[in-house]
């Protein structure tokens, strides 16, 4: 099936909220010690007013991925600096697909679109954060040429997770 990517707009806020919550839970619930903490995290990311504000931010670009239905999305922030470094570029905040749609080449297509957009906006670097426990994603990004820059911790009241920061010169 052909993948169609389109830039999201304010009218897509509810769709992104539903996709974000459902896809995140399907992929990552098992990594959380506390459902309450996960729900708090998801509210901060996919609560409708949060998304509406993000969709109106000119330094942020959201994409919706569709075949016969919406089944994935991505978020990119322009001119973002890697914490505690002088490295700046486009930040790939999110690139998620419905679990049934992974492994079909859609992620690579979305990544190439994001890379081209970053170049077109004048970015010289593309970076992202990925959970070290998400070995499949780490391998995927390595395969696409991204290199490990540093690691940091994501900490909640009940757990710590290692985050790999990966990047690619454009």
Image (cartoon, rainbow, N blue to C red):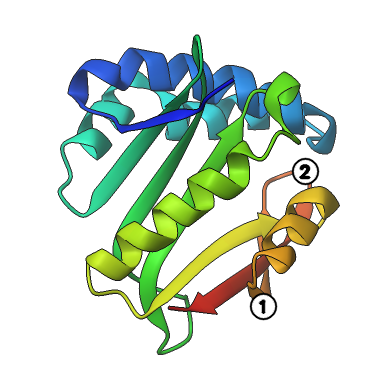
Q: Residue at x 28, y 29 (%)?
A: 8
Q: CA distance from mark 2 to mark 1?
A: 30 Å
Rendered view: 62 above or below 59: above
| Quarter of the image that includes the N terminus | top right
* 88 shown above or below 36: below
Looking at the rendered structure, the secondary structure element under dot 1 is: strand
* Circle 2 SS class: loop
Q: Which residue is mark 2?
A: 158
Q: Residue furthest top?
A: 68
The residue to which callout 1 is attached is 147
Is 132 positioned to the left or the right of 60 in the image? right
| Residue at 58%, 36% in the rendered image | 96
Give how far across and how far down residue 146 sits, in percent: 63, 72
* 159 displayed left or right of 15: right
Residue nearest the viewer, comparing 39 with 166: 166
Residue shown at 65% from the left, 30% from the top: 38
Q: Is residue 35 visible?
A: no
Q: Quadrant of the C terminus?
A: bottom left
Toward the front, the furthest residue is 1
Q: Quadrant of residue 99?
A: top right
Callout 1 crowding tier (Cα within 10 Å): few <14, some 14–19, many ≥20: some
Whether residue 19 sits left or right of residue 17 in the image: it is right
Residue furthest to the bottom in view is 86
Left or right: 115 in relation to 121 = right
Are the residues at dot 2 and dot 1 in contact (C-beta closer than 8 Å)? no
What residue appears at the point 31 percent right and 69 percent down from the top-left corner?
Answer: 119
Residue 20 screen position, x and y as percent = 52, 25
């Amino acid at each position: 099936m052909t993948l169609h990517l389109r830039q999201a707009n304010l009218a897509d806020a509810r769709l992104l909220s539903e996709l974000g919550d459902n896809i995140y839970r399907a992929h990552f619930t098992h990594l959380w010690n506390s459902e309450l903490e996960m729900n708090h995290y998801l509210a901060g990311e996919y609560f409708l007013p949060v998304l509406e504000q993000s969709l109106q931010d000119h330094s942020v670009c959201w994409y919706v991925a569709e075949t016969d239905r919406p089944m994935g999305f991505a978020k990119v922030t322009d001119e973002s600096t890697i914490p505690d470094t002088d490295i700046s570029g486009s930040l790939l905040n999110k690139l998620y697909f419905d679990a049934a749609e992974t492994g079909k080449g859609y992620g690579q297509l979305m990544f190439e679109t994001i890379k081209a957009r970053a170049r077109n906006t004048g970015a010289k670097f593309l970076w992202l954060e990925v959970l070290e426990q998400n070995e499949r994603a780490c391998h995927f990004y390595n395969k696409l040429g991204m290199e490990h820059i540093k690691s940091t911790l994501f900490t909640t009241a009940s757990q710590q997770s290692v985050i790999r920061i990966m990047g690619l010169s454009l």
